[in-house]
Structures are given as structure tokens and as C-alpha cells.
Image (cartoon, rainbow, N blue to C red):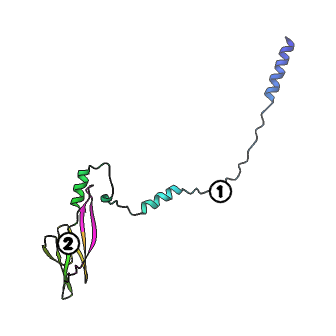
Amino acid sequence: MKYLVIFLSIIILVSCSHKEEKKETVPKALPEKTEIEDIELKNWAKSLEEKPYKINISKLKNPFIAPEVLKSTIEKRGKIPLDLVGILEKRGERIALLQDNNKKGYIVKVGTKVGNIKVLEIGKDYVIIEEEETNIYGEKERNKRILPLKKEKTS
């Protein structure tokens, strides 16, 4: 037993005196900052800069709109059939004569409104008008169109 106690005490002394060596680590120089390019973020930023696009609903079949609603909306959106039948120029100001299907005439100048149509420009043989329409989503749209001077039929 005496030997056992001596043996254990030697082991304890050896284990206590044995210190673990700590290696001191010298901090290495930090690597240079690498810039990460976020391609998706750049694409998203570009898409925000683009103008929004419009969808022409008369050419689009929407499964969520009842056919009756779509048909009535397209009928309402029908353009007023106006023809340009004459242009007069007096003192540098042009006046145009427009005519609808019922042969009702309208004498207009730049800025005149006829229903939802506004006259923007009167040229020598054309008139540019702007039509204000409401689509099925309730948004107002403005569309420009050119009315050419209607030629008289010669027999």
C-alpha cells in the first residue's frame, strides 16, 4: 500500500508540474476587403428606372373578367367616329371642321373640347386630338390620334 501511495503521489506531482504549452498566435494581417457585386440589386434598380408598361386589354383575354363586362367596356371605349372635313386659316389662327357619323358638325380650334376629346394641334391637312378614356380598372388613359383631312370624292 505504501508503494501505491508513493506511486499515486508521483503521478499527481508529474501531472501537476506538466503545464500545457500555449502557442501564442501572432495575428496575421487581415485580408484586403473584397467588394461583392450584387447583380440582382443592380438589376432591380434598373427595373425601377424603367417606365411602366401598359397592357392593351382589348387584345388580352382575361379569365377573371366576365365576358359581358369586357364586351360592354370595349363598346364604351369605342372611339367617337370623327372626320376632319375642313380647315380654315384666319389671321394666322386655324379652325377645323369636324363631323361625326350623324353628319353633326363641330367647329373647333386648339384647346377646344368635344366630349372626352380635346384638340391639341391643327395642321394644314390634319388635326391631332387627345381622347381621355377610363379603362376597366378605373384608371384614366389619354390617347392621341391624328385625323387626316378627308378628301372629297370626285365623280
Q: Nearer the viewer, residue 137 or 84?
A: 84
Precedes in sequence: disc 1 or disc 2: 1
40 w.r.t. 151: above or below: above
Q: Residue furthest front?
A: 155
Mark carried by residue 82: 2
Q: Position of residue 39 (x, y in %)?
A: 53, 57
Side of 35 relative to 114 (left or right):
right
111 w.r.t. 68: above or below: below
Residue type at numbered disc 2: Leu
Asked whether 111 falls inside the magenta stretch, the response is no
Q: Which part of the image, by quadrant, shows the C terminus?
A: bottom left
111 w.r.t. 137: above or below: below
Number of labelled discs?
Answer: 2
Q: Which residue is label 1 attached to?
A: 32
Gap in angstroms between the C-alphas marked 1 and 2: 71 Å
Side of 63 relative to 102 (left or right):
right
Q: Which residues are magenta?
A: 131-155
